[in-house]
């Protein structure tokens, strides 16, 4: 496709654009070539193999973090048995040797995240996006070219709707309309034939009337019926005419074909092979056996799976909403502004309005250590509803898991506990998700976060109205600890965030900070190691190298806060939340602790972190990774 596109472009340049718009055909072919190449890259990225760039970055990080050591070597974990731990701490009875307890936010097992962790299901998701892109790309190009034609006419170059292309940039409507009609017919056939063989192997046949289960048969019948309707609408659009009077045929046909394609894809994941076919495949136990098992879906799970992408986009880009709103006011775009941007004064008034609205949360909403309960305040009720939606247990954070080492959760609920969370990760928004998923444990725990977060108006409003979240300052932390309320913080801070290499071989944890240990001793707070297995891979940070450089020079990580997934899209990597709580380390109160005492408790804490890592890394799927401590 690339070769044909390049040849068409050369012909267009040498001979000049004629009646078919050679340059536009070249661009259209280049678009499809890039789509095919992109799908190939996505499938390669989903194969769990690290690419060379990530390996090089990991190696360079290893060179920069020359003080990093293996956590197991640092902690001497082989000597830290249960009896050793109990003998080195006071006020704690030995924990029984039973398996670690776990708590799940729901007795049901939501499918969304677990479904994505399976390689076959990731392939199906990529197949889904590829099919929708192939189906709707011609329609999108048709609409885009119509808009382009309108813009060309607006600037004075008049191009008739049904005429040829004299500018070399407009393809006749009939051409894209014909491609749209062909895609409407051929893409579903590809879905049914090739997709069925890809995901069900020898248990699938192209013609299997009334086989595969009631859900499969119903979806197939409805989907193929809608395909016929969409094809007739697109054919009518071509036969009757491609003018403005009949464009509704194109739009309605494309919408119906999309619904039909979704139904056919839904029928694929609900295909149930007959017992004879299924048993014959399972007995052979080859690659096909893994594909023949149906995925358990329901309408509710499908709905939340789709909504999870909206949740993901909103949470990953929440910090951009206010700046973009302000920029839109400055450049004269009418986006929720009180005045029409018809003059410089109106533009300045809109910018001032946006600035005041963004400043109001900082001026009017105080942070509180305790959760706020709203009954009549509409802003508080709306904020609670938004948090309940964005962190819903069946959406983006479905399948969240937590393990704990103590005999019961009540041990962690006792007052005077400091939950020290590690690693920091690129953007630790999952802390809010953890607190929301496991409210029975963390409802009364005050979370202390980086002060720079409070600068963002959206975070200020959300966390301030919610309560239980406070910017970290020693004075505030001491005030809350004097009330004996349980607290939580991330001791690694910025240095640990910049040491984070998503998908790298090594998970780096900074152990240079000891202030939280000193404060815990001064206030008599027990330490609870809280390990976030998912945090390291949650986001990619394209500006990390710039932040490392500025942090080294100034102590402040200056850079554009762009957080993306491994494919550079504005979403997270959708890593499921996996948390493990270590044993509660008892600490004796001492207002003037010695350096040796701080060092002893500090070592106890990170030895327990290492032990928790070693215990749960296989269960959580991190057995191929290493944990390193950075001094």
Image: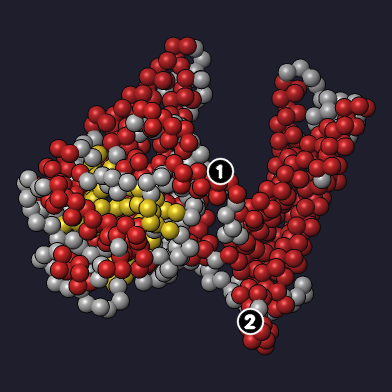
Picture quarter containing residue 241?
top right
Q: In the structure shown, which secondary structural element does the residue marked by tag 1 occupy?
A: loop
Is there any visible trace of residue 370 in the rendered image? no
Q: Residues within 10 Å of mark 1 (few under 14, many from 20)?
A: some
Q: Is residue 240 left or right of residue 445?
A: right
What's the residue at 67%, 64% (across, down)? 264
Residue matched to label 1? 568
Camera-side residue of 334 and 295: 295
The numbered disc on residue 285 is: 2
The numbered disc on residue 415 is: none
Callout 1 touching callout 2 (CB < 8 Å): no
* Up/down of 425 relative to 292, above or below: above
Q: In the structure shown, which secondary structural element does the residue marked by tag 2 occupy?
A: loop
Q: Quote the CA–CA distance across marks 1 and 2.
A: 37 Å
Camera-side residue of 610 and 531: 610
Picture quarter containing residue 464?
top left
What's the residue at 40%, 41% (across, down)? 498
Of the image marks 1 and 2, the number of the one nearer the N terminus: 2
Q: Position of residue 224 (x, y in %)?
A: 72, 64
Q: Residues within 10 Å of mark 2 (few under 14, many from 20)?
A: few
What's the residue at 46%, 44% (across, down)? 63
């Amino acid at each position: 496709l690339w070769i044909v596109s390049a040849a068409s472009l050369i012909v267009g340049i040498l001979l000049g654009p004629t009646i078919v718009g050679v340059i536009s055909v070249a661009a259209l072919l280049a678009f499809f070539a890039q789509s095919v190449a992109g799908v190939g890259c996505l499938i390669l990225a989903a194969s769990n193999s690290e690419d060379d760039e990530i390996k090089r970055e990991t190696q360079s990080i290893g060179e920069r973090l020359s003080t990093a050591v293996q956590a197991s070597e640092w902690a001497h974990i082989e000597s830290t048995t249960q009896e050793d731990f109990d003998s080195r701490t006071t006020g704690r009875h030995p924990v029984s040797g039973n398996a670690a307890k776990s708590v799940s936010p729901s007795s049901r097992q939501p499918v969304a995240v677990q479904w994505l962790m399976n390689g076959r299901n990731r392939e199906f998701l990529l197949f889904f996006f590829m099919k929708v892109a192939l189906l709707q790309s011609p329609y999108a190009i048709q609409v885009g070219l119509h808009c382009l034609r309108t813009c060309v006419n607006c600037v004075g170059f008049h191009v008739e709707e049904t005429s040829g292309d004299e500018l070399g940039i407009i393809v006749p409507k009939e051409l894209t309309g014909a491609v749209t009609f062909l895609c409407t017919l051929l893409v579903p056939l590809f879905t049914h034939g090739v997709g069925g063989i890809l995901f069900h192997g020898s248990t699938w046949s192209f013609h299997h009337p009334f086989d595969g289960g009631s859900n499969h048969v119903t979806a197939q019948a409805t989907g193929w019926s809608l395909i016929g309707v969409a094809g007739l609408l697109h054919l009518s659009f071509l036969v009757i005419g491609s003018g403005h009077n009949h464009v509704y045929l194109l739009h309605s046909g494309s919408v119906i074909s999309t619904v039909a394609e979704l139904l056919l894809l839904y029928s694929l994941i609900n295909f149930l092979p007959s017992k004879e076919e299924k048993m014959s495949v399972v007995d052979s136990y080859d690659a096909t056996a893994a594909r023949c098992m149906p995925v358990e879906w329901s309408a509710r799970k499908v709905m939340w799976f789709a909504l999870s992408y909206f949740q993901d986009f909103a949470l990953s880009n929440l910090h951009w909403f206010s700046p973009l709103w302000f920029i839109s006011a400055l450049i004269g775009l009418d986006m929720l502004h009180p005045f029409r941007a018809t003059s410089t004064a109106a533009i300045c008034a809109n910018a001032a309005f946006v600035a005041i609205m963004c400043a109001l949360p900082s001026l009017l909403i105080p942070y509180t250590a305790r959760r706020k309960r709203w009954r009549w305040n509409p802003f508080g009720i709306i904020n609670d509803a938004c948090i309940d939606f964005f962190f819903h247990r069946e959406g983006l954070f479905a399948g969240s898991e937590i393990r704990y080492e103590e005999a019961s959760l009540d041990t962690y609920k006792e007052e005077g506990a400091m939950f020290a969370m590690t690693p920091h990760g690129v953007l630790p928004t999952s802390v809010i998700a953890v607190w929301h998923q496991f409210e029975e444990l963390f409802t009364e725990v005050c979370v202390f976060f980086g002060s720079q977060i409070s600068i963002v108006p959206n975070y200020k409003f959300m966390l301030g109205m919610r309560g239980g979240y406070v910017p970290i300052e020693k004075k505030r932390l001491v005030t809350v600890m004097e009330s004996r309320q349980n607290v939580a913080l991330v001791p690694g801070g910025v240095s640990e965030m910049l040491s984070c290499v998503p998908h790298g071989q090594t998970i780096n944890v900074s152990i240079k900070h000891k202030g939280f240990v000193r404060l815990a001793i001064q206030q008599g707070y027990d330490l609870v190691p809280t390990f976030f297995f998912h945090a390291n891979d949650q986001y990619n940070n394209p500006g990390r190298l710039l932040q490392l450089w500025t942090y080294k020079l100034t102590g402040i990580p200056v850079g554009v806060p762009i957080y993306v997934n491994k494919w550079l899209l504005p979403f997270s990597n959708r890593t499921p939340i996996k948390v493990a709580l270590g044993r509660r380390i008892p600490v004796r109160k001492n207002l003037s602790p010695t350096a040796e005492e701080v060092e002893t408790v500090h070592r106890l804490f990170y030895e327990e972190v290492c032990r928790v890592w070693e215990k749960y890394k296989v269960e959580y799927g991190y057995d191929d990774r290493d944990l390193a401590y950075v001094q």
